[in-house]
Every structure is written in structure tokens, then in C-alpha cells.
Amino acid sequence: MKKQVFFLIFGFMFLLIIETNAQYTTNNIPRYLKPDFNEYYIGNPNLPSIFTRKVVHTYVPPEVAKYVPEHTRIQTADGFELVNISPGNDAQTETWIAINPTNPQNLIATSNDNQYLGGYQGWRMSSWYSLDGGKTWTHSTTPSNVNVYIEPPTKGGMTIFDPGVAFDANGNALYTYGYSQINTGNINAEVNGVFGALSTNGGVSWDGWGSDLPATAIALSAYDMGNPFHDRFSVASDNNPNSPYKNRFYVSWQRFRVNAGVVFSYSTDNGKSWVGPTLLGTGNTQAPLPAVGPDGEVYVAWINTNYPSEAQAIVRKSTNGGQNWGPSVLAQSINSVGTLFPASGRFVLADKQHMRVSSPPQIAVDRSNKSTRGWVYVVQAGKDVPNGSYRVYVSRSTDKGQTWQSKIRVDDNSVGNDMFFPSISVDPITGMVAVLYYSSQNDPENNQGVDAYLSISRDGGNTWKVIRVTPSTAYLNSYRVVSDQTGDPLQGNLYWGDYTSVTAYDGVVYPLFWMPTLPKADYGSNDLFTAPISQKIKPVTNLTGKSLFENNQIKIQLDWVNPTTDMFNEPIGNFDILIYRNDIQTGAIATISGSSPSTFIDLDVVDGTWYSYNLFVRASDGRESVPVSVSALAGGALKPLPPQNLTWRPKSDGFEIFWNNPEKSIDGSTIRELSGIKIILNGELVKTLTQSQSQAGAWTSDVIPMQAKTFGKVKLVTIATRNGISQESDSTDEMLVYAGPIYSQLKETFEDESSSIPRYTENGWEVTSLVSSSAPNSIATTPNGKYENNTNYTMYLAPVILGDTSNTLSFDNMSLIHRTDHGELAMSTDWGKTYKSLNWYTINSSDNFISGDPQNSQWKNEVRDMRPYVGDTVMFRFMLVSGPALADRGWFVDNIKLDTRYDVKEDNTFDPLSVNISPNPVESIAHIKLTVNQPGNISYQLFNSIGESVISSDLGYTNNPFYNFNIETSNLMSGMYFLRIIVGSSTITKPILISK
């Protein structure tokens, strides 16, 4: 509740600030809103820019920081495998990725890592390397920065930030980053710098200059007068094999306070020493990025922001390895992503917790030998006009940066809502252009959802193919998803990252981005994701393998669904399915035309032998899919499935149980040797029925003796026997059964047990004289004290037939049940297979219930109309469900009756909405069954015990009287929750207990 109040206050203040801005006068308008701001800043370079922010460590709760997602490899619907390369390692944001030109299977990914921002192991930068084309990844770090160039201050701390990485032509990798003092109380005196670490082994380690030189200082503020602040570093390398500047590393960054603007340095000795820096641009600049052309030319692109929201992409070029530079060229001008936040002067995404954004350009050059060789591309996210829709725009130069064709749209966001953090790469082999970006297009209503998208062009940017990279949308819908970099959210410096990265080589694109892995999108759960995405053929889907036994012959049948497009969603034309067996790739055992039925039967199998199958899709142009595998046991598994569809009926001295014998074994193969069924009653084997294979799948029954007017728990087990070896199935779920008469009347006062209706109880429910509605007795869950936590107290009554004279159920009760727990009255019309909830009860059900005091509480009569069920045989269930923390005296019940009540009106109808939740308590998945007596839109919210909404969903319109859905609860903590369901104008709220 406190959070809700906070956000209401925050929202009101934000609106108030905006309203105040609309009424600024020349005397009170903030300096950064004035039209002459750029000139003001240029004339006062010692002033810190409003965009100067060091990324600092964010406290993340240990359970979030250490959370490891269950799945780290996700097969997407488009046929590529998305890999989480940093699972369970605190938060990673801001990415850069590079491919080794000497070994394209070697990639290095880098990012800010929240764990190391806080000084873990001496302020290091994280990297991950792959030696198999991005399939698997290993973590490594740069050396410790403690006392290498900058000593920690006596007051305050340190931070490390802004990763970048590039390979030279020899496969050496340079990792650039910033390292700075923070929180000293004097920001102008905080020593900081730009640093680099070298790897000569593909990112396995970062000690390329030896232990005596763990890092090189590209720039160090202590070397310069006025102590400038260095920010937003990016690196590139000339790895063109025939370039006169081969193996040069280039670094550009933003310098503040002293000689402020975009600066550039280069190295000719693998980054060990540096020439420069050279000042390339001044103004309201930020985020410069270098790129290298095919003939050794060097480009640097940066953003220049003009009031109020113009984001200019400025480009300069050098043709002599960074020694001299041509004039600045405006490559593109758009309106910035986000809205200006008054308190900070930053642009923010208001619907995403006011996370900071901007529209800096990224730049890439075509170094292929295609017709587009030398073309230059710049990408930005923003708006064409101030009030327009968000777009991702590419600007293209076909004359090496002299002139530009701007605002080529690459996205397919028809909603026009938030898109941000685009990055760009050009494949040096094929000339393919790839743009990665975040988009909210899958959340048109709230604009809080985020997905990663990839736009690809193979014709120099004329046309674009859009691919959704993320299989599901993450929702940035609470304050916990962002990092507050100032300790004051009203400052508007809320951080989710600043830039992404993408690279490509020989037709394969590698996007690198971060996404949260917890359902609530906690900032601390942000992990890095990538995938090798190419124009390979999509693989087959829904591949299954099962053993068949037909006409006394064993065979294995494979079934699958053929693809129709490649991974860029373009038609694949003619293709074949190649089937290999047991990982032998020298010869396919079958080649199935794509126009033939997608099935194959292997007759060359030996009973009891496992076989594995790999299926490839091969197009007529030679392109192949990744393999999809399945295994099957010839002859099928011996272990059978348990009996199915259990039900029962009472007999005077026992019960008759009915079931279907299984037809399958546990692997889905046809059962071959059905030999028996075990019937287990109350934990003891009471009968073993001999069965034969001809009875597989047959509807079967048997009568089991049991004392009259008693209950029991029964379960069944299947037996299969092959070659003298028998194996049993898992047992069925236990089913409650009853022996004895079916009652036509019900009047239970708990006075005489000999005349009471038979009942079955679990965990309590004792007859007591402590209190009663009709003397001397009642029944209670725990008459002698409080009920236990995390316990279900259940009472079942023997079945009764509802008739014209027994169409109303009533009972007296005192539900001294804590409001976080509940009592439930439910009924079953299918002999206990399912139960329909009739009503829930707590201490709040009556003002006359006194917590902890049954003697002074007053009984309340409850009445339920049973006329809709006249003619049915019904079992009633009373159940108290307690949660993990609080408790009360329990549920007291008396005078349970079936009769005809005149105070039930003849025109009484069904409730417009009723709900059944099973199981409850729930561990991982709650199955929700609705009975809906009016059409309407269905939505739900799940609240925790302090009123926070933890899950919500809009399920759409229904006019079906029965509607079922599931709620995934595995990622929620144990405790009491409340499910609110809305159908049209009707609302119902039910408690759910999550217990793990």
C-alpha cells in the first residue's frame, strides 16, 4: 500500500512539474530549457553537463542476484536458439559484441555487470567468450583495477562502466571501459579515466600485456588540467587485411568540464600506447562511436542535442588513420526518444518508470566485396516530428559519408509506441545490414512491455525484414525494474541501460541485449541474451518418435511438422527432410520430400534397443536447418501408464470401481504386455486382477468389499510383463470412496453418532460440547485451540440424492478463521472427481464473530439453493485452508440440513460468476475453472497479502458458460494470495494459498 501511495504522490508531483513548466517565465525557466543552452554550455565548459552520469552499483536483494532461471536456452518459434549467456550473475546491462576475423567461431560479449560495479574482486569488467559460434559461453573478467592508476578516495568509492570491445586483424581483442572515483563530495575533483585491457586468446583471459601492465590508460583525468570527466567510450579496429592502417585500434569518447566535446585517440601497438586525444566536436554532444571502412577510412558518429528535442547524428571521417579529419556532416536529424524530465533535463520513457533514454547514433560501414562496398549506415530511434510516432531510422551514405539519405524506416511497429537503444552492424562478407532495438509494439495499451527486435536488409537498406528475437514480452511496470542512480527517483536518473550491440559475419547475425528473467522483471535479474541468427532453413517442429507393435512386428514411427520459411520468414521453395540414425552422419537412412507426408516408419529395429534420430531440412539451394533430435525405444518401454478415468459407485457392503485399462506405455508407445491391475485400498493391496493384452484400453470394473457406512482411499496400478520381467506403473491418484447407502435426507446435529450421516475427516473435525447451536454438540476443526498453519482441515459427507423436498442446504456456523485463511463449502456431482465451490467463509463473514472467542461469538445460519441440482447425487465438503503465518480458533459447524426453505425465492438464479481453484494450496500451477452466467470480457489480478498486484492478465471476451485457465505460480513465494476475477460487470475474489 505504501508503494501505491508513493507512486500516486510521484505521479501527482510529475504532473504538477509539467504543468509548472508550461507556465515558466523568462525569470524562472531552467537553464537547460532555454534556446541558448548550447551556447551557454560551450561558453562555460567547466560546468558539468546534465548528461554526465556515472553508472554506479545498485543494491540487489540476494535472492534476486543469485536467481538462476530454469531455462538458459530457448528455442524460439522462428527456429533459432536464444542463449542466456549470464544466468544468475546479478544484473548485466549495456552490451558490446565482436567477432574474431581470424576465427569467426570466436566471439566476445561484454557488458556492465552490477556485481563488479560494486567493487567485487577489485572493480573488474565482465566478458563472455564463445569458441563455437555462440552456442556456448564462458565468463571471464579484466584484471583488478585497484590502485593500478587511480587510488580509491578516502571519502566515497569507485565505479567501473561503459564496456566496448574490438578485434584487430591478428585476433587480438581490446576491451575499453571507464573507471572513476564517486561520491567524494567534490565531483569536479573525482579522478577518472578511459582504460583498456588486451586479450590474445579470444577473451579467455585479459592479460595480453603481461602481469606488469594489467591495463593501459587511454586517458586519465589526473594527467590533464581541470580534471575532465571521461564518458561513453567506444572502440573499433582496422582489421582489413590490406589496409595501410591495419591493426590500429580507435577509441572515441565524450569529455566533460575541460576542452569538452567528442575526442578521439588511436593506437598502433595493440593498445599499449595512445596518440591523442583529438577534439572532434563540441556542443551538446555525447556517445561518439567509431567505425572503419574497407579502405582504412575511419568514421566517428555522435549525437548533438538541440533544444527542445532535436537529436542530430553528426559524422566526421579520417582517411589517414585518425591523424586528420574532414568536416562534420549532419547525417540525420530526428526528435529524441522520450520526453524531457523537468528535474534532470534528461529524456525519459514515462510509461517505463521514467527510465532514462536518448537518441545517440550508431554507425557501421560495409566492408564486403559486394556492390554496396563502402556504404555507410547510421541508426537512431526517435520521431520524425515532435508529436509523431516512434520509429527506428537508418541514414545511408553511398559516397563514403559525403551525402546522406536519411530516415529510412526499418521497423514494423504499427502502434508507434516506445522503441529505443538501436544498434547496427554490416556483415563484412555478405554486406547484410542488421539493426537491433527494443520495441513496445506488443503492448499497445500500456506501453510497458519490451521485446528485442532485429531488422535485416540484404539490399543495402532498401527493404527490411523484421524478426522478433524475444519469445515473450517483459513488462517494465514497477519501480523494481530500474536502477535509481541517485537515490532519489524524482531526479529522473533511473537506469535500465544505455546501449545495445549487434555484430554479423558471413550471413550470421549475433544480437546482444539484456532482458529480465524474473516474472516481475526485477532489475537484478537482467541477463544477457544472444543467438546466431541466419537465413538458414527453419527446422522441423513437433518431432515425435514412438514405438509401434502391429501385426506382431516392431517398428518406430517418426512424425513432425515441416517448415515453410527460412529464419528470415521467407519461403524456402523445394526441400527434403534428411533422416540420420544414431548420430551417424555419413548417410541418411531416408530422404523424404517436403511435398510428401511428414512421417517415417523405421522397420529395421531390434526389440529393446534405443535409437536416436536427427532430422535436417535441406533446401534445393543447399541451405540446411539445424538438426532436431528424438529418441525412441524399439518395442516401447515396458513400464505402462496407470489406469485412466477412475470413478466409483457405492454398494451396500463395498464399492464398485470403474476404469480404462491403459493403451500406452510411459514413452507413448503401444502397450504390448498388459498383464494385471492392482487395487490398493487404504494403503494395502486388496486385489490383483489378471488382465490380457486384448483388454488394453478396455472399460473395466470390479467390486471391492468394505464395511458399510465407511470411507476409504483407493488407487490402482497397472502391471506389464515382457519376457518374464514385470514392471508396474505409477499409481493413480488416491480417490475417496464410500460404502453403504446413498442418503435422501440430511439432518445432522452431531448429537448421536449412531444416527449421524457418515463422514470422512482429515486433520481434525471433532465433535465438541464447547459450543453448539442446538445443544449439546457441534463439530469443529480444532475445538481445543487454534488451528495449525499450512494445513487443510477437510470433512466429507456421505452422498445424498437431492429431491423436491431436499432442495436447500443450510447449516449454522462460526467461522473464526483469520482473514488470510478461509473456509470453503463445496459440492461434487461426479463422485468426488471435481468439486464446485459454493461459498467461502472467514472471520469477516459476520460482525458477530469474535476472534479467538467461540463462547461469545454468535452462530450464523447459511443457506444455499440446491434446486438446480435436484436429481443429482451430491457429496458435500467442508474445508478450512490455513496459510503460513496467522491463525484463529477455527470453523464451528452445526445443524447441517437439507430441506425446503421458504426464504429462498423461487426466482433465485445462479450467481453471475463462480470459480473453482485446484489444487488449493497450489505449488506451481493453479487451475481455474469459471462458471460464467453472463457474457463479457474476462480479466484477473493476483494480489499478495499486502495488496500488491503480482500477476495480471486480460483473457479476452467469452460467451461460453464454462471457462478454464491456468496461473503459473512457481516463481512466487509461499503465502496467502487473493485472486480477483472480473467477467463483464461481475467481480469475485478468492484466496489462493501458495505452498512450496
Image: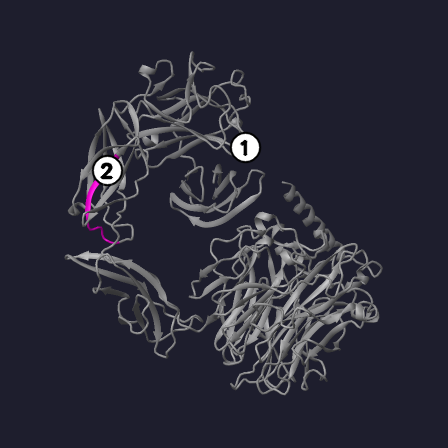
Query: Which element is circle 1 on?
Result: loop
Residue at image location 81% in from the left, 67% down from the top: 227
What residue is disc 1 on?
Answer: 885
What residue is disc 2 on?
Answer: 678
Query: Between 109 and 782, which is closer to the camera in this rendering?
Result: 109
Query: Which element is circle 2 on?
Result: strand
Residue at image location 57% in from the left, 77% down from the top: 171
Residue at image location 47% in from the left, 19% down from the top: 783
Specify whether residue 674 is painted magenta.
yes
- Asked where in the image residue 437 lies, by quadrant, the reply is bottom right
Task: Give the residue type at disc 2.
Answer: Lys
User: Which residue range is magenta in the image?
Assistant: 669-679
Residue 715 visible in the shown view? yes
- Asked where in the image residue 807 lies, by quadrant, the reply is top left
Residue at image location 67% in from the left, 86% down from the top: 319
Query: Between 417 and 149, which is closer to the camera in this rendering?
Result: 149
- Asked where in the image residue 121 lies, by quadrant, the reply is bottom right
Specify whether 688 is left or right of 300.
left
Residue 479 at x, y percent in the picture:
63, 50
Residue 904 at x, y percent in the picture:
40, 25
Q: Quadrant of the N terminus?
A: top right
Residue 495 at x, y percent in the picture:
65, 58
Task: Give the residue type at disc 1.
Answer: Ala
10 Å neighbourhood of mark 2: few (<14), some, or many (≥20)? many
Query: Between 373 and 175, which is closer to the camera in this rendering?
Result: 175
